[in-house]
Image (cartoon, rainbow, N blue to C red):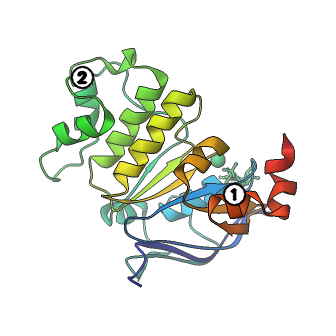
Amino acid sequence: MSTPLIEADNVGVRFGGLVAVAGVSLSIARGEICCIVGPNGAGKSTLFNVLTGTVKPTTGRILIDGKNFSGRPVHAFARRGVARKFQAPSIFSSLNVGDNLRVAQRQGSDEIHLGEILGLLGFSGMADAPAGTLSHGQKQWLEIGMALVARPKVLLLDEPTAGMGPEETMHTVRLIQEIASRAAVAVIEHDMEFVRELGVRTLVLHQGRVIAEGGFQEVADDDHVRDVYLGRG
Ligand SMILES: Nc1ncnc2c1ncn2[C@@H]1O[C@H](COP(=O)(O)OP(=O)(O)O)[C@@H](O)[C@H]1O
Ligand SMILES: [Mg+2]
């Protein structure tokens, strides 16, 4: 097997007396999509914060391309190709779609592959549309596009379908499948229909620990998972 693009090795995160992540190991390979699910407060976003370098793990290591990045600054993670989309969209409503993508371009990077990203997002011909007039779903996709401008090797998406209807959610599944040909993708999601449709390796976090890992059905059938999460309603 090839070296994973990104790897959390027995990562723990403590905030004062609170243990947010308690010894999580996770690795994502090139071309792979992986889903992370779990109830509120399980430590999912904190795990992403560690994978992007914004939170330093209390214990354990983060490896990118097999190199130890623990303790390195956020920009080192970004430069190495780790990008993320936060839970809340943070596009610039007063700018048009094309300019939102242009501002996401870091100084010194290649000429933006604007047409390619617009096509991928389903936004062909929409570069001049004001971002503020986009639908909720389109705003989320634009933000994913902004993360893609830097040609990341690893893309982390924190609840990309939040607030979306079923059609927008399914469009997001297809978008992520297309992105997987250019970056490893990890997705935090609440929407089980989304996770089922994506049908990829799924990790269930609970109280900072991985309580199950496997294909969607395997995880969905797990008694412990049903107790803490899926069975709740
Ligand atoms: N910066 C922080 N400082 C203190 N506590 C935090 C911080 N970030 C997250 N937490 C706590 O860590 C736990 C896990 O949070 P989080 O990773 O956001 O969970 P999830 O994304 O699974 O809902 C929660 O109890 C949360 O309140
Ligand atoms: Mg979260």
- Disc 1 packing (10 Å; few <14; some 14–19; many ≥20): many
Residue in the picture at 24% in, 22% down: 126
Residue 25 vs residue 77, the one in the foreground: 25
The residues bearing labels 2 and 1 have C-alpha atoms spaced at a distance of 37 Å
Instruction: Please indicate whether residue 50 sits to the left or right of residue 116 in the image.
Output: right
Name the N-terminal-most of marks 2 and 1: 1
In the figure, residue 67 lies in which quadrant? bottom left
Give the numbered dot on residue 126.
Answer: 2
- Left or right of 115 on screen, residue 73: right
Residue 191's label in the rendered image is none
Q: Secondary structure at mark 1?
A: loop
Q: Is residue 215 among what the camera can see?
A: yes
**Viewer-proximal residue among 191 and 155:** 191
Q: Quadrant of the C terminus?
A: top right
SS state under label 2: loop
Q: Which residue is mark 1?
A: 43
Q: How many marks do you count on the picture?
A: 2
The residue shown at (44%, 20%) is: 135
The residue under label 1 is which amino acid type? Answer: Gly
Which residue in the rendered view is the most extreme toward the left? Answer: 111
Residue 178 screen position, x and y as percent = 35, 49
Report whether the residue tagged 1 is closer than 8 Å to ligand 1. Answer: yes
Q: Are marks 2 and 1 in contact (CB under 8 Å)?
A: no
Image height check: is 170 above or below 177?
Answer: above
Residue drawn at (62%, 64%), measured in percent from left and top?
215
